[in-house]
Structures are given as structure tokens and as C-alpha cells.
Image (cartoon, helix red, strand yellow):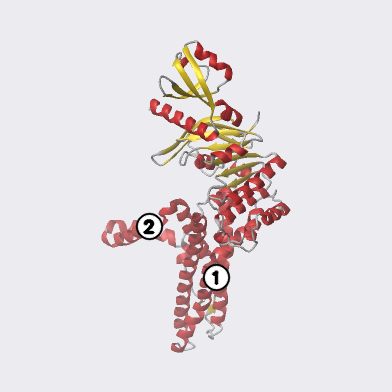
Amino acid sequence: MTHAITIDNLSYRAGQHFAIRDLRMRVPNGSVYGFLGPNGSGKTTTLRLLLGMLPPADGTITVLGHDVPRGAHRALARIGYVPERLHLYPMLSVAETMRHHASFYPTWNASEAERLRRAFDLRDEQAVGRLSKGEAGKLMMLLALAIRPELLVLDEPTDGLDPVVRRDVLAALLEYVSAHGATVLVSSHLVHEQERICDWIGVMDGGRLVAEMPMHAFRSGIKRLRIAGAPPQAAAAPFGILARRAGAGREEEWVVRDWRDDMTSWFASGSASVREVVDLDLEESFVETLRAARDAGGRAA
Amino acid sequence: MFGQTLYVQWKWNRDFLAFYTFVAFTAPLVILWVALPHLGLSSARELVRVGGVVGIVVAVISVCAGMTVAWQGYGLDERVGHIYALSLPLTRTRTLVMRAASALALLTVPALGVWVGSVLAATQVTLPPSLHSYAGSLAGRALLAAWLAHACMFALRYSAGRRARAVLFALTLIVGSLGFATEAVPGARSTIVGTAEFLISNPGPFGVFFGRWSLIDV
């Protein structure tokens, strides 16, 4: 499998309290990679590092075959970027912004840009500084898609948008991706939205990537088990244990990952039995993964 | 690409440019218009002195124009966190070169104001044979001074970021302290004055600011 983005041992420090430490990340070519994490976990900083906007303290970043930050300008010519907040010049009109943006990208597709402008109901003469949040989100997505990028880096692209605008923006994104096979790295804390569109998932917390796996593994591999009796030594378990809590009566509740149905026999090797296996949705899986990572971090500290 | 960069800077700075161009255009006319009734037509010394006043006013306007365009231009990107400029597929060097070139193009506008105003002002007086008007030289010097002031201010903002005001204030304090030191510390005078002379006299780096600015000269 080839990767659109490869990050190894990436470190970065901003101020006293925030640091990205030894980050390793792989975004497969052609995937829609959801970058999940709570606010302040380092998602935006990581995106800016891989776009060459911030200089890493250590580590290597390769984006579309270019070393970043040294070759960032070459990579950026093939990347459509939508930041979390409006980053365009406020005194330009929509048409002027499109002309300005087009002049930097030889791959700019004017007819596609015009089609998207009409579809998004943006008027040429509207000043960017006076656009509503939804209109600004649509304009940024238009600029990102009209350069026909091989990689789309989207930082909370639908955050704060109303459901209608969110649907329009996501529809345009998915239409482009299905037509061109582009890779998408989309950061968000809207877990259900990620579940709908992503086929890979990375979970960031406290400047660390605490999980990275295909979406189906994340969605189907994390279970909540209701265990009765005395289970065998947890250290020997053939699955990962994210959480272990006391349940009702003498029961325990385990949250596990990499679960397969045939693993119930492992409990029988002790004097325990699995009473119930509950599928977790993505949001619950996300919360349990974060909780486990924080517990592990706390124990390590 | 350059045209669009220039257009953005023009649209953002055009009110200030219009102001400085107007002032640069009218300053020579107004100064000569005010001074002429008090001068004899053959008073060469007085004409040179008035030409020098025009030159000093043009110098101040040029430096202010250059600094304003730099402060504003950088401020535009600062408003949007520099994200847009950094996300464009350009090296930082190329971005800076395009900014410097667009500043030169924009600052040509007030310099043209200086030139047209100076030419018109010079036609108000009949110069004695020993004197000449230097409208073109004055406008050229104004353009260079404005561009250098732009470069200094842009460098300051680029390196100091949000602390630019504090750094500017500190620089002013340092220059003031050095000026005071030339009087208060006898041993330091020759070093400070020597360094200052190197900086402000031609071909020193800031020579264009402090050379002879005059509309009318021998």
C-alpha cells in the first residue's frame, strides 16, 4: 500500500504546555482518512506541520512524495486545503478571490469553479468579509476542489455549518473524491460525520496518535463485554483491553479491541463466561479509545 | 500571479496610497505658493532654501508611505493568521520577492505625485540661470526612500510579529539613548557619530534617507 502522507517521529512544541511527540502516521493513497480528537489534541497543528506552515522540531514528513517543509511548495500545488476558519482576504469579492486563487494553480478548472459557485449559490460580487459562515465554508471548499487536487486536507470543514450547507459541502466533496480518486484527510470532532464518509481513522489526544486503523476495524473491532465469573490473567488476553470496570453483582464490564467471536473461548479457560457482546458505535469507540489512552498515559506518568 | 498579488495589495492600500499621492502632489505646490509672495524672483538663496523645504517634506511623506504600505500589507495577512499566504504553492523567498516588487509598483504612485506636483510647482517660478529644478531626481529619490522604508518596516514586522510595536518603540529608545550618549559620554561620541555617519551617508545603507533632498538647487 502506498501512502499519500507519511509521518515518522514527528515532534513539535508550542509554548510550555503543548507538544506533539513522536507522531507516526500513515494516510493511504485514495483513502478518506478521518482525523478524530478532542479540541486541543493537536489535530490542527499536525495538519499545519504536514502542509509546511510550521517547522517541526524533529522527525520526517513526506506528502505526495515531497519532503516537508523543504518541498512544501511543490506538495501544496497538488493539495486543496480548507482551514478551520476563514483565511481569505476580506476585502476581495468572491470573483476576485477565485481569480486570485486561480493565478497560483496551473491545474485550476475554471468551468468547474463556476459550476460549484452556482451550485453553492455564491454571488460574484459578494465581499468575502461579509459572507456568512456557511457561505465562507462553501467558498473555501470551492477553492480547494477547483484546483483538482490529488490530496484534500480539511480542518473541521463543516464545523458550525447548518445541516443544509453541511450536506452541500459534503456532497461536493464526495462527488469529487469518487470522480477523481483523491485522498482526503479530514479533521473533525463530529464523530458521526466521520463514520459516514471515512474509510480510515486516526485518533489524536494530547499530541499523540493513540489509534490508527481502517474504519471497519475501528467500528467492528471494539466491543463491550459483560463477563461473569473470574476471568483468566488479563495480560494473556488475545485482544486489547481498553477498559475494565465492575458491573452489576459479580459481573465485570470490559471494553476490548481487535475482538473476534471465537475469542469467547479464552474466558472459558478461566472460570468466566461472556454473557453479552455489545457493538459500540463510532462515538462510543472513540470515547473508550481516548479514555484508555489517557489511563495508560496517567499510569506511565 | 504577480498581477493578482499586486491587485490585492492595491485594493488593501489604495486609500492610503491616494492620501499620500495627494499630499505628495500638493506639498510642492503649496509650499512654493505660500513662499513665493515673500521671495524676490532673483533671490537664489531663498529659492534653494524653499526647494530644500519641499525636499524634506517629500522625504517625510515618502518614508511614511513606505512604512504604511508595509505595515498594512503585513497586517492583511496577520488578520487571517498568515494561513492563506502560507498555503499557496510558493517558496517563502518567492513570496517575499513578489511582495517587494508589488510594493515598488505601488509606491511608484505617490512618487509620480511628487514628480507631477514638483514639475507644476517649478513652473510657478522663474529660476535664475544658476539654479535648476530637480523634479525627476526628487521623485526618484522619493521612490527609493519609500521602498527602503517599506523593506525596513516589513522586515521588522516579519521578524517581530505581534511585538513589532514594542520593538519599534525599543529601537526609538535606543536611537534616542545613543543621541543622548554622544553628549553625556565624551568617550563614546566619536564611535557613535562615526557609525551613524556610515549608516546615513552615501553609500551607507540609509544614505537615501539623509542625502540632499531638494527641488531647487544649483
Chain identity of mark 2 = B
Q: At which x and y percent is residue A124? A: 65, 61
The type of residue carrying mark 2 is Leu
Q: Quadrant of residue B139?
A: bottom right
Whether A75 is drawn above or below A299: the answer is below
Relative to A90, say whether A253 is above or below: above
Residue B89 visible in the picture: no
Q: Give the residue furthest to the front.
A: A249
Neighbours of disc 1 within 10 Å: few (<14), some (14-19), many (20+):
many
* Amino acid type at mark 1: Pro
Q: How many marks?
A: 2
Q: Residue at x 56, y 26 (%)?
A: A221
Asked whether, in this view, residue B122 is left or right of residue A143, the answer is: left
> Which x, y percent locates residue B158?
48, 53
Q: Identify whether A242 is placed above or below B106.
A: above
B75 and B28: which is toward the camera: B75
Q: Position of residue A136 (x, y in %)?
A: 58, 55
> Which residue matches tag 1?
B110
Query: On the rendered structure, is B50 left or right of A157?
Result: left
Between B46 and B157, the residue placed more toward the observer is B157
- Tell me the SS state at disc 1: helix
Chain to which mark 1 belongs: B
Give the residue pinned by disc 2: B171
Residue at x 46%, y 13% (from the top left corner): A232
Taking the spot 46% from the left edge, 65% from the top edge, the residue there is B209
Does dot 2 land on a helix, a strand or a loop? helix
The verdict on a common chain for dots 2 and 1 is yes
Question: Which quadrant does the N terminus of chain B fall into?
Answer: bottom right
Q: Is residue B123 something that shows in the picture? A: yes
For marks 2 and 1, the one nearer the N-term is 1
